[in-house]
Image: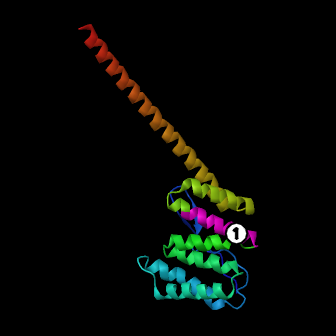
Amino acid sequence: HVVPDTSRVRLTAELFFQAEDGIRDRSPSRGLGDVYKRQLLLSLIIAQDSTSISIEAIKAIRDYENLINKFPDMKGLNYNLANIHSQTGDVESAMRQYKQTLSSDNSELRAHALYNMGNLEFKNGNVKESSKLFREALKLSSEDKDILHNYLNSQKILEQQKKEEQQKQDKEDQNNKESQQKEDEQNSNQKKR
């Protein structure tokens, strides 16, 4: 049983992409098919009610935690659990599980974890950190167009932020200069009297 690649959704107006449930083509389930099936259903369950975590989502989380305890070297389990946490809005738990995934021998899995971590960081407003994560993911999967796209967009946003900050500083400097000139002028006029 192979978990199929899911459709992509827009994360921001800057066209950042993240797999809807973060899952890409995965290896056979090795007898863990029921858990993977539950995760596929999880997408529908979460999409229907994003304000609370369903009983099925809680069961899936518990099942993955049990499997991770039994098979700690199967880092794909951490990755899938991270995806569930991400979908349910538990960013802290998602990041913790993605970080566990980074010890995998599978470079593609590590790249996907870094990519999803980058998307979470971006979504939380940490563009600089997201850019670093996308860059690391690109080192592992240089042909991945989504990772490249997100990396380039994050760089573009960082450049734009840098320009805006410089413009703000320039305007502040100009205002300070004008204020100083007015003050100097007033002082000069008072001395003449």
Please state the extent of the stretch shown in magenta in the rendering: 105-120
Residue 146: which quarter of the image? bottom right
Tell me if 12 is positioned left or right of 175 in this view: right
User: Relative to 34, does residue 98 appear above or below in the rendering?
Assistant: above
Whether residue 3 is situated above or below residue 176 in the rendered picture:
below
Looking at this rendering, what residue extends furthest in the front direction?
A: 191
**Residue at left 71%, top 59%?**
138
Which image quarter is the C terminus in? top left
- The x and y percentages for residue 157 are 55, 49
Q: Identify the amino acid type marked 1.
A: Arg
Residue 7 visible at all: no
Residue at the location (73% across, 69% down)? Answer: 108
- Above or below residue 182? Residue 38 is below
> How would you classify the magenta stretch by its main secondary structure?
helix
State which quadrant residue 40 falls in.
Answer: bottom right
Residue 14 in view in this figure: yes
* Circle 1: element type: helix
Q: Which of 24 and 129 is in front in this view?
A: 129
Q: Is residue 71 left or right of residue 41?
A: right
Left or right of 137: which side holds 15?
Answer: left
The residue carrying pointer 1 sits among few (fewer than 14), some (14 to 19) or many (20 or more) residues within 10 Å by Cα, namely many
User: Label 1, on which residue?
Assistant: 110
Near-viewer residue (54 or 185): 185
